[in-house]
Amino acid sequence: MERSRDEGDNIPMREIIHIVTPSREVLIDITDRVHAVVSRSGIQNGLVNVYAQGATAAIMIQENWDDSVQTDVVHLLQQMIPRGVWLHDRQDGNGDSHLKSGLVGPSETLPLIDGKLGLSTWQNIFFCEFDGPRKDRKIVCTVMADE
């Protein structure tokens, strides 16, 4: 865990979350880890930005109630962007991973309301791995207070 925060009431707090990914393509629920960063920040109202470092990973807000939704996301992207047919595959065989992460996007920004993430009942924050398994994926979590 790496953290940085300067002194002051409205100075953003930034922390790096490290995770291990178990397979080539998987969505991993990181909501509790992001909430822990928010709690440590002491900030009650503002914005939380969650950013996946790496050109073959992404961040997605998705349903948390049924794991089949995450599986369906992976399967949809596999159908839309198949493996082994892209020009970049000649370099290192992961052209599809780059396209999937670009389509989903590297970050999400959420409201922070009274110390809680502004997610609905059925929403969670997911790290999307498209080129695993990886021993150390980094997620930058930045908490910013309202003015």
Image: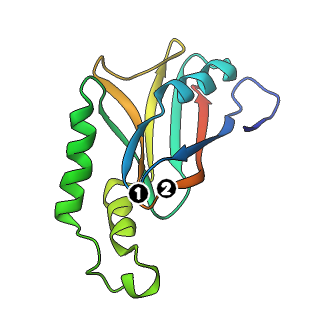
**Residue in the image at 58% along x and 42% along y:** 19
Along the horizontal axis of the image, is 80 left or right of 3? Answer: left
Q: Position of residue 5 (x, y in %)?
A: 77, 34
Relative to 128, does residue 11 appear above or below in the rendering? Answer: above
Relative to 57, does residue 29 appear above or below in the rendering? Answer: above
User: Would you identify the image quadrant in which residue 146 lies?
Assistant: top right
Along the horizontal axis of the image, is 52 left or right of 145? Answer: left
- The residue that label 2 is drawn on is 133
Q: Position of residue 102 (x, y in %)?
A: 37, 63
The three-letter amino acid code for the residue at tag 2 is: Pro
Which image quarter holds the N terminus?
top right
Relative to 133, does residue 108 appear above or below in the rendering? Answer: above
Q: Position of residue 41 (x, y in %)?
A: 68, 23
User: Would you identify the image quadrant in which residue 109 lies?
Assistant: top left
Which element type, helix, strand or loop, lies under badge 2?
loop
- The residue that label 1 is drawn on is 24
**Residue furthest to the right:** 7
